[in-house]
Amino acid sequence: MTLNEFVKKYSGPKLAITITGGGVSFAEIASIPGVSNILHSIYIPYSDKALKKYILQHNLIIETSAVSEKRIYQLFNCSISENPNCLHIIISAALTTTRYRKGKNHAMIFVAENKTDTDMDFCELELEKLDEPEYDFLIGIHGLETLRKKEDQQITYKVLELLESRITKNG
């Protein structure tokens, strides 16, 4: 399913989307004509400072790991407190960047309507990570942008897969 197909097919509660660290290509949904019928908001606290400010605004304790289950649930609690009648899509990711990172490349995705939603979807998407020599080669040929876009698009496909599953279950 593409973003366009999803916008045409979806008829549930409006979407409240929070994205941090990666998965930003899913925000392209805002550029699709007619999306205002299904989109409530997109919030992207991208920098560490903006993310911490967003969490503190909701009187929550800041976790140390940027991409963790605890962080996802914190962001869900922030989103639900601001937008109680929405379907919440939370995306947090650590992806290829301009420096070689030691940690894994991965994303966590959470989709739920409310805290008692029996159809809550949570998944961790592990993305391929280059070893350091391959990474250094990509820097040399200016290939990081292409890799990052590919990783980001994989997250969008996974989110769409989760949403399509919800549509199928709920009719």
Image: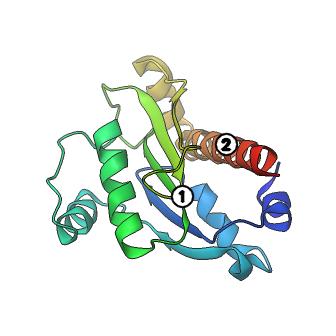
How many numbered marks appear? 2
3 sits left or right of 40 in the view: right
Q: State whether residue 57 is above or below residue 165.
A: below
Residue at image point 83% right, 52% down: 171
Q: State whether residue 22 is above or below residue 36.
A: above
Q: State whether residue 3 is above or below residue 32.
A: above
Task: Locate residue 1, reporting x and y percent.
Answer: 83, 48
Crowding at mark 1 (Cα within 10 Å: few <14, some 14-19, many 20+): many
Residue at image point 15% right, 65% down: 59
Question: In this view of the protein, can residue 50 be seen by the observer?
Answer: yes
In front of the other: 80 or 18: 80
Task: Locate residue 39, reporting x and y percent.
Answer: 64, 74
Residue at image point 81% right, 45% down: 168
Identify the mark at residue 162; answer none if there is no mark.
2
Identify the mark at residue 113; answer none if there is no mark.
1
Task: Locate residue 22, reporting x and y percent.
Answer: 47, 49
Quadrant of residue 97 within the rendered picture: top left
Which is more N-terminal, label 2 or label 1? 1
